């Protein structure tokens, strides 16, 4: 009988719910990240988990699963958050726009003057209202903070220093109609259906003339060896968002939920710093390898931007005032 009781006690200890009840029990939560160890967003995820554990005095523990070990696609992470199978996920703003259409506006090409302009928007009323709208959308998601993902730029097999040089070029793009139209308006041909790991070979084989992405991806994928011309046109700056499942609110105390939200906000600056360091490192690597980097003048960027008018009319319809407010931010 004593052995049976002992076994029951052991199983009881194992099966004790980890949900917070205000009496000091540890709540164990999970966070999904598709990027690899050492990537800026992964480092920020881990800093978020560290801060939460520290500030809650161990009441809340967040296990970070990076490299897509939990969910290989960000859309899968979002679905898991909605049904409560996952607690946190770092995702691009792009798929979240399905629930908050206004997020499509901040992805319009040539919208920002530079990175500082984007952060003025995101950290101001516009960006914060969009975060609030995520939870208000009834999606079951909570927007905690933004992370940096840099600017996307074109890289090609031939020099591009202006709009004229884009004509006829076949550029690999994500499967995004707006991006395809963007390249068409610039005189090129957008090519979809090529995975990120296939870009190098597609360029080498002449299937495409180039692609577009941020510095770290350009460097880490080795694409710079096949397309050694990089133009800093910064056509899009799509931020990342750290999301929580609304179910987390029921798993932790009200006090710890406030701590979680505050810790997320604090990791934003940390991630921005990590991103800047990674960009600098990637740029040093590719320039040392002989890549030609071209920085367009303000006038040349204006030529790119002027061609986007039809795209703004199509994708910015109904948000004209918001677009103008973004453009005027910081002026």
Image (cartoon, rainbow, N blue to C red):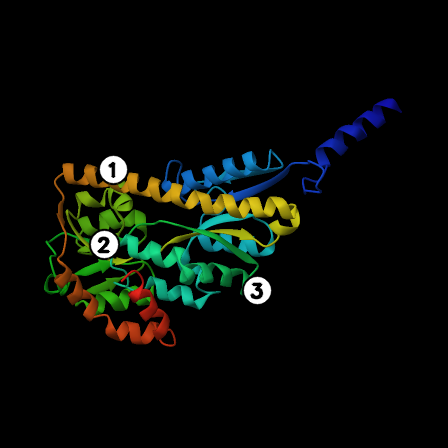
Circle 1 — which element? helix
Circle 3 — which element? loop
Q: Position of residue 325 (x, y in %)?
A: 34, 68
Mark 2 / mark 1, whichever is N-terminal: 2
Residue occupied by mark 3: 138
Specify few, some or many for label 2: CA neighbours under 10 Å numbering under 14, 14-19, or 20 or more.
Answer: some
Residue occupied by mark 1: 281
Q: CA distance from mark 2 to mark 3?
A: 35 Å
Q: CA distance from mark 2 to mark 1?
A: 17 Å
Q: CA distance from mark 3 to mark 1?
A: 41 Å
Which residue shows up at 45% across the image and 59% down it?
Answer: 128
Q: Quadrant of the C terminus?
A: bottom left
Say if mark 2 contacts mark 1, CB within 8 Å. Answer: no
Q: Quadrant of the N terminus?
A: top right
Nearest the eye: 273 or 154: 273
Mark 3 / mark 1, whichever is N-terminal: 3
Which residue shows up at 60% across the image and 52% down it?
Answer: 84
Residue occupied by mark 2: 153
Establish if 327 lies above or below 289: below
Which residue shows up at 36% across the image and 74% down it?
Answer: 321
Q: Image check: 292 left or right of 106?
A: left
Circle 2 — which element? strand
């Amino acid at each position: 009988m004593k052995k049976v009781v002992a076994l029951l006690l052991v199983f009881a200890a194992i099966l004790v719910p980890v949900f917070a009840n205000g009496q000091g029990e540890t709540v164990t939560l999970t966070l999904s990240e598709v990027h690899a160890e050492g990537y800026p967003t992964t480092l920020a995820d881990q800093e978020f988990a560290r801060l939460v554990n520290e500030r809650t005095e161990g009441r809340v523990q967040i296990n970070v699963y990076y490299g897509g070990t939990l969910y290989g696609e960000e859309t899968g992470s979002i679905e898991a958050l909605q049904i409560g199978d996952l607690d946190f996920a770092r995702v691009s703003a792009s798929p979240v726009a399905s629930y908050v259409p206004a997020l499509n506006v901040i992805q319009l090409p040539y919208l920002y003057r530079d990175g500082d302009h984007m952060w003025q928007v995101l950290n101001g009323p516009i960006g914060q209202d969009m975060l609030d709208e995520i939870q208000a959308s009834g999606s079951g998601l909570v927007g905690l903070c933004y992370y940096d993902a840099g600017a996307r730029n074109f890289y090609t097999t031939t020099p591009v220093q202006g709009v004229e040089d884009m004509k006829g070029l076949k550029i690999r793009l994500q499967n995004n109609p707006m991006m395809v139209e963007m390249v068409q308006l610039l005189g090129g041909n957008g090519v979809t259906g090529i995975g990120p790991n296939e870009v190098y070979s597609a360029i080498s084989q002449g299937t495409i003339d180039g692609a577009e992405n941020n510095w770290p991806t350009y460097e880490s994928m080795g694409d710079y060896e096949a397309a050694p011309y990089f133009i800093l046109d910064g056509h899009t700056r799509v931020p990342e968002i750290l999301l929580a499942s609304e179910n987390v609110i029921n798993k932790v105390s009200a006090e710890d939920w406030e701590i979680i939200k505050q810790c997320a906000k604090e990791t934003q600056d940390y991630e921005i710093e990590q991103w800047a360091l990674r960009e600098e490192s990637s740029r040093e690597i590719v320039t040392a390898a002989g890549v030609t980097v071209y920085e367009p003048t303000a006038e040349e960027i204006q030529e790119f931007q002027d061609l986007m008018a039809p795209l703004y009319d199509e994708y910015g319809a109904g948000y004209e005032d918001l677009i103008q407010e973004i453009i005027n931010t910081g002026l």
